[in-house]
Image: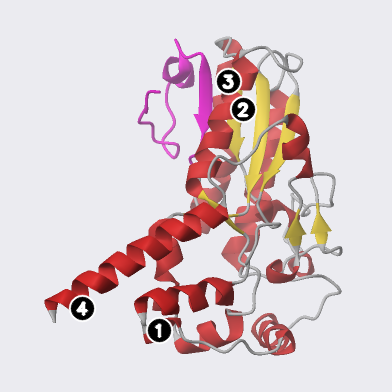
Amino acid sequence: MEWRRFDFMMGGDWDQLVKGCCAVVHLAAELGRMECMQQVNVEATRQLAEACERQGIAAFCYASSVSVYGSGRQRLIDETSPVLTVDRDVASQYWALDYVRMYGRTKLAGELALRAAAKQTRFTIVRPAVVVDINQMIGIREWDPIKRLLAAHRHAHHVYVGDVSDAMIWFIERGLAGRGLPGEVEVYNLAEDDCPDPRHIDFMRKAFAVSHDRRYKSVPVPALADWLHDFLRFRTLPLRNPLWRMRFSNQRLKEAGYRFRHGMADAQRLALSALEKDSGIKEAER
């Protein structure tokens, strides 16, 4: 694998960027600056896909996001579920801040740009849930007390970063092996919502047990309080589900033949082991 540096805001020679490649993994995105999202998440994705078609790239894997679904009317979300309105902001479709809604719309627009460009390259779109590494799992202790109180009950939607990267490489290998039709665009959720102990509070209790760090102590409040908090934040009460109440299906991923190499159970064990080791070092230093 070769990392190539390129400024998606400035543009340049897209054909030269991908020339000589067998496949492309497209991870780049603008996550926060709304003024840059259209260029980075949509236009650059379109130009990159078109260059791949011109240069005869065999396989292309694009990291989108489950944010394209917004706040679903149904709790169980699969790849055929309704998505956001792509060409304008409809606030009632997504219980989220303005920049998050725009991120979802522009990632969806990037998907549509791939579909428009697809002719010979085999495109795979993956929609990861909440991607975390070990430090991010441990970092829940940095939440402020109010967030810990309100969010402890939530389904975390965590998927381990090692599994996300492994899945994308698996899809690239699949495309290079000629699976699927030229110009085909496949879409897969990358989620492990069926993992054991999926709530924030589940991990926090385990983390407190090994570290005795009181920042992991929390009592989950009823979900109704979380609903009320969102209502006060967004001043809307649409008949939709907030993210924490939704469940993202990975059935299509399983049917394609992929199984997570690590899984959140192993990722949690790694995080707890790191916490226990760190706690032991600090205790010895005292």
Could you tell me which residue is drawn at 51 percent across and 78 percent down?
A: 205
Q: Is residue 199 left or right of residue 32?
A: right
- Splitting the image into 4 quarters, where does residue 178 fall? top right
Gap in angstroms between the C-alphas marked 3 and 2: 5 Å
* 45 is higher (above) or lower (below) than 88: above
Looking at the rendered image, the disc whose residue lies closer to the viewer, 3 or 4, is 4
Between 137 and 81, the one lying in front of the other is 137
- Mark 4 lies on a secondary structure that is helix
**Mark 3 touching mark 4, by CB under 8 A?**
no
Q: Amino acid under label 4? A: Glu
Residue at which label 4 appears: 283
Are there few (<14), some (14-19), or many (20+) residues within 10 Å of tag 3? some
Gap in angstroms between the C-alphas marked 4 and 2: 45 Å
- Splitting the image into 4 quarters, where does residue 223 fall? bottom right
Could you tell me which residue is drawn at 76 percent across and 15 percent down?
A: 181
Residue at which label 1 appears: 215
**Mark 4 touching mark 2, by CB under 8 A?**
no
**Which badge, 4 or 2, comes first in the chain's sequence?**
2
Residue at which label 2 appears: 171
- Mark 3 lies on a secondary structure that is helix
Gap in angstroms between the C-alphas marked 1 and 2: 39 Å
Gap in angstroms between the C-alphas marked 1 and 3: 43 Å
The image shows residue 28 at horizontal and vertical percentages of 48, 40
**Mark 3 touching mark 2, by CB under 8 A?**
yes
- Residue 33 appears anywhere in the view: no
Are there few (<14), some (14-19), or many (20+) residues within 10 Å of tag 1? some
**Which badge, 1 or 4, comes first in the chain's sequence?**
1
The image shows residue 92 at horizontal and vertical percentages of 78, 70
